[in-house]
Image (cartoon, coloured by chain):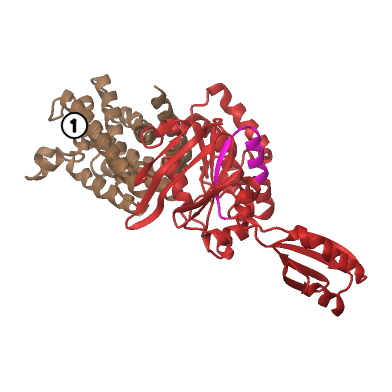
Chain colours: A brown, B red
């Protein structure tokens, strides 16, 4: 409980210091709005089919935007040392950083979702699964960003690496076209990426169960990604701190 | 009083380079203990190992009864560290920084703001409390960083080169804050390369050079190690050739230096030569305007113990990139 409280304080500070700032908010909102407009103008009738993908993309980009650089950035300015001096274990620090970016990502994604759903005339089926997809995906994407941030030394490396992961995911994860329509061996790669399960789960909830994988599996796999990415981030974070400090 | 810090055979290698070489010492509760040495001596590395920021290559460190390696979180609850670079959060205000630190250190919710405001007032930061940290001057940043280290009432305060880079007035003010903190019963461990600072603030000093501790003792005892030659300085209204000749051949005087109207007598027998010298001066009709004894300073002792040029101690480290 004490750990969770302190993680919350870290998240709260990060929200105020980094996330709730105009540049990040505008970046978080701009990307999905641009994609929505691009698809709408290209194919107004077919846009409903890509709404799950667009929401998934929004979550991905808004959760990873700062997460991927926050630890590297704070290490560079000496602020990370301040956290390491406090009576916090590594787990709490990572949890705090993850929560901050997840909260921000969820805020942006929920905002976009609340606009898209009524405009497109969609309705939400499996409401609680829908909520869990948001939460698990937000955590998984934030942790992907955190993993990048702990694994590199410089901020520009973190930005490069995060784009290296994010942009291919746009094409590999069923955002704009189904995974099943991709040539072999691309689907193998798709099933190794968390965004695939986000998009698939959202298709179940928004498009009358048009997802390829059972909904419960989407949720379980996303949860699995959360644990895997957290464990990996923690391992690399500890190693990196011991090397650098 | 028992020891609140115990360090045994603490060693740190950075690759092949030995930064800290099997050092051992203890710090008593309530004392101000100083680590004095030139840049690169291993002072910062030692302090970082003691607060759990850097892993030692070997050896042990116990702080307030907890093994730093095995119980780092427990150790951090009882200590405050003021690092060399003032690294609070630039975008948070002075008050917000203190409240955030209070949150991280588990200060009860009801006390956080009260504590923060009290420290703001105590450290003379009231008119700056709503300014972002990055907009404060270096001296104010340093004061706030010390305040942040005290927000949770630590038992032990670690200060790494607290006055480096500060102007004279800010440094003076900071030293007063350190003295005031000591009066409240805080145990203070500080590192410095300013010999006068170590002498004025510390109850005991460890002189460290190239990772090795050369001596641990009180400033007075360290100075006593070089109490061989003392200096009697007398200022006169005039100095005649006759007077010089009379003084030159007096017993017990090793050297005489004359500059303008001042004479310095170098001697190992200060108590014995002073009366005869004054008698000669009076007989020659010289009017004594000033009279001083100049004892060996800590700087003299440091030079003798370490073999280093005291000018080396006056060089500040280049400032690291950071919030400052």
Q: Quadrant of residue B59?
A: top left
Residue B284 lies, in percent from the top left, at: 91, 72
Residue B214 lies, in percent from the top left, at: 50, 53
Vertical side of A87 occupied by B239: above or below: below
Residue B146 lies, in percent from the top left, at: 58, 41
The one nearer the camera, A242 or B50, is: B50
Q: Is residue A215 magenta?
A: no
Given the image, what chain letter belongs to the residue carrying mark 1? A
State the quadrant of the N terminus of chain A.
Answer: top left
Residue at the spot 24% in from the left edge and 36% down from the top edge: A53
Vertical side of A56 occupied by A5: above or below: above
Residue at the spot of label 1: A200
Q: Is residue B73 left or right of residue B290?
A: left
**Residue situated furthest right in the rendering:** B285
The one nearer the camera, B69 or B261, is: B261
The one nearer the camera, A241 or B261, is: B261
Residue at the spot 17% in from the left edge and 24% down from the top edge: A215
Q: Is residue B176 magenta?
A: yes
Judge whether residue A42 can be spotted in this image: yes
Tell me which segment is drawn in magenta: B175-193
Within 10 Å of disc 1 (Cα), the crowding (few <14, some 14-19, many 20+) is many
């Amino acid at each position: 409980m004490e750990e969770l409280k302190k993680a919350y304080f870290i998240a709260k500070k990060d929200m105020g210091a980094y996330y709730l700032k105009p540049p990040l908010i505008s970046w978080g909102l701009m990307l999905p709005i641009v994609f929505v407009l691009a698809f709408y103008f290209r194919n107004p009738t077919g846009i409903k089919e890509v709404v799950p993908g667009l929401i998934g993309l929004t979550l991905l980009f808004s959760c990873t935007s700062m997460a991927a650089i926050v630890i590297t950035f704070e290490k560079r300015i000496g602020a990370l040392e301040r956290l390491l001096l406090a009576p916090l274990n590594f787990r709490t620090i990572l949890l705090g950083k993850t929560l901050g970016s997840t909260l921000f990502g969820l805020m942006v994604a929920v905002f976009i979702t609340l606009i898209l759903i009524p405009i497109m005339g969609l309705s939400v089926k499996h409401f609680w699964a829908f909520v869990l997809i948001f939460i698990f995906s937000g955590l998984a994407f934030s942790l992907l960003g955190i993993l990048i941030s702990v694994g590199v030394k410089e901020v520009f490396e973190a930005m490069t690496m995060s784009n290296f992961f994010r942009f291919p995911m746009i094409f590999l994860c069923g955002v704009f076209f189904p995974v099943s329509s991709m040539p072999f061996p691309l689907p193998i790669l798709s099933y190794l990426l968390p965004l695939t399960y986000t998009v698939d789960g959202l298709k179940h909830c928004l498009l009358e169960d048009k997802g390829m994988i059972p909904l419960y599996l989407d949720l379980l796999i996303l949860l699995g990604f959360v644990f895997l990415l957290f464990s990996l981030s923690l391992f690399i974070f500890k190693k990196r701190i011991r090397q650098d400090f | 009083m028992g020891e609140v810090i115990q360090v045994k055979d603490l060693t740190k290698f950075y690759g092949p380079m030995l930064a800290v070489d099997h050092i051992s010492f203890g710090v008593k509760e309530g004392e101000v203990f100083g680590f004095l040495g030139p840049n690169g001596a291993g002072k910062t590395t030692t302090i970082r190992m003691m607060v759990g920021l850097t892993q030692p290559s070997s050896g042990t460190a116990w702080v307030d009864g907890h093994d730093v390696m095995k119980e780092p979180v427990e150790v951090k609850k009882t200590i405050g560290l003021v690092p060399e670079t003032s690294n609070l959060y630039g975008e948070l205000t002075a008050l917000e920084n203190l409240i955030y630190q209070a949150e991280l250190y588990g200060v009860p919710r009801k006390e956080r703001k009260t504590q923060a405001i009290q420290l703001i007032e105590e450290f003379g930061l009231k008119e700056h409390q709503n300014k972002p940290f990055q907009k404060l001057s270096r001296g104010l940043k340093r004061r706030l960083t010390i305040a942040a280290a005290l927000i949770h009432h630590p038992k032990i305060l670690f200060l790494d080169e607290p006055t480096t880079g500060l102007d004279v007035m800010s440094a003076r003010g900071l030293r007063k804050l350190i003295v005031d903190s000591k009066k409240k019963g805080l145990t203070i461990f500080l590192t410095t390369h300013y010999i006068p600072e170590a002498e004025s603030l510390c109850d005991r000093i460890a002189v460290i050079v190239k990772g090795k501790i050369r001596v641990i003792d009180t400033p007075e005892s360290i100075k006593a190690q070089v109490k061989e030659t003392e200096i009697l300085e007398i200022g006169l209204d005039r100095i005649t050739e006759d007077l010089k000749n009379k003084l030159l051949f007096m017993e017990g005087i090793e050297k005489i230096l004359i500059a303008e109207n001042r004479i310095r007598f170098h001697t190992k027998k200060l108590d014995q030569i002073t009366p005869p010298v004054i008698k000669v001066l009076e007989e020659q009709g010289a009017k004594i305007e000033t009279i001083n004894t100049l004892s060996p300073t800590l700087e003299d002792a440091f030079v003798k113990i370490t073999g280093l040029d005291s000018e080396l101690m006056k060089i500040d480290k280049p400032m690291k990139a950071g919030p400052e």
